[in-house]
Image (spheres, helix red, strand yellow):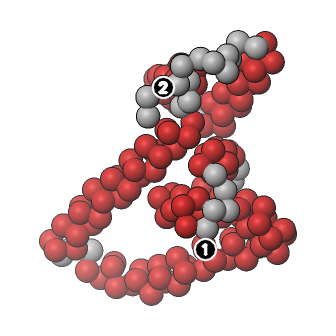
Amino acid sequence: MLPILQREIVEKNGWATDEELADYFAIGQCTPGVIAVNTATFIGQKTAGTLGGILATLGVVFPSVVIISLLAGVIQKFSDLEIVKNAFAGIRVCVCVLIFNSVLKLWKAAITDKITLVIFALVMIAATLTNLSPVVFVIIAAIVGIAIKSLGIADKKSPEVKK
């Protein structure tokens, strides 16, 4: 869903920038529910108010509910077949590639200088070595970002990270 959201929201419709979408993904990760649904709700509310948020949420959830309801019984009956297992193995690889592509696009929007690269590296290390909630990382990164800007540590002329 994240690659689809990025393509539809940023590239196709221009409802948000890559930076805004990265913010929505971060907030969506911290709020209860599925990140794609939360992000769609934020975009819907931004573009068309409360009704837009409700309709965007339904637009993301409803097709999935219908498809899953139709396929649930069929998949369970055939899940032991080798061809079905192989199909899901291929689908998992494809999903990884799509997520990786989204990560690269978010990287370009988020890692803009040496300081953001350091924040990224520290969060990556901490996330790998601990079992802390993503909410903790987002809050800490937000505080660090505010502190860096407030203290003037981030220099507007600092060299950009190669994208």
Residue appearing at x 67%, y 62% in the figure: 15
Choose top left, top right, bottom left or bottom right for residue 153: top right
Q: Quadrant of the C terminus?
A: top left
Farthest residue, direction front: 157
Q: Position of residue 9 (x, y in %)?
A: 60, 63
Q: Is residue 142 left or right of residue 62?
A: right
Residue appearing at x 43%, y 28% in the figure: 162
Sequence order check, earlier mark of 2 and 1: 1
> Marks 2 and 1, how far apart in space?
37 Å
- In the image, residue 133 sits, relative to residue 28, either above or below, namely above
| Residue on which disc 1 sits | 61
Q: Nearer the viewer, residue 17 or 21?
A: 17
- In the image, residue 90 sits, relative to residue 31, either above or below, namely below
Kind of residue indicated by mark 2: Val
Residue appearing at x 54%, y 31% in the figure: 111
Q: Is residue 101 left or right of residue 42?
A: left
Kind of residue indicated by mark 1: Val
- Which mark is drawn over residue 163? none
Q: Position of residue 39 (x, y in %)?
A: 65, 58
Q: Position of residue 103 (x, y in %)?
A: 45, 44
Q: Taking the image as drawn, is residue 25 in sight?
A: no
- In the image, residue 76 sits, relative to residue 113, either above or below, namely below
Q: Position of residue 78 (x, y in %)?
A: 25, 80
Q: Taking the image as drawn, is residue 125 in sight?
A: yes
Choose top left, top right, bottom left or bottom right for residue 47: bottom right
Q: Residues within 10 Å of mark 2 (few under 14, many from 20)?
A: few
Q: Secondary structure at mark 1?
A: helix
| Residue on which disc 2 sits | 161
Q: Secondary structure at mark 2?
A: loop
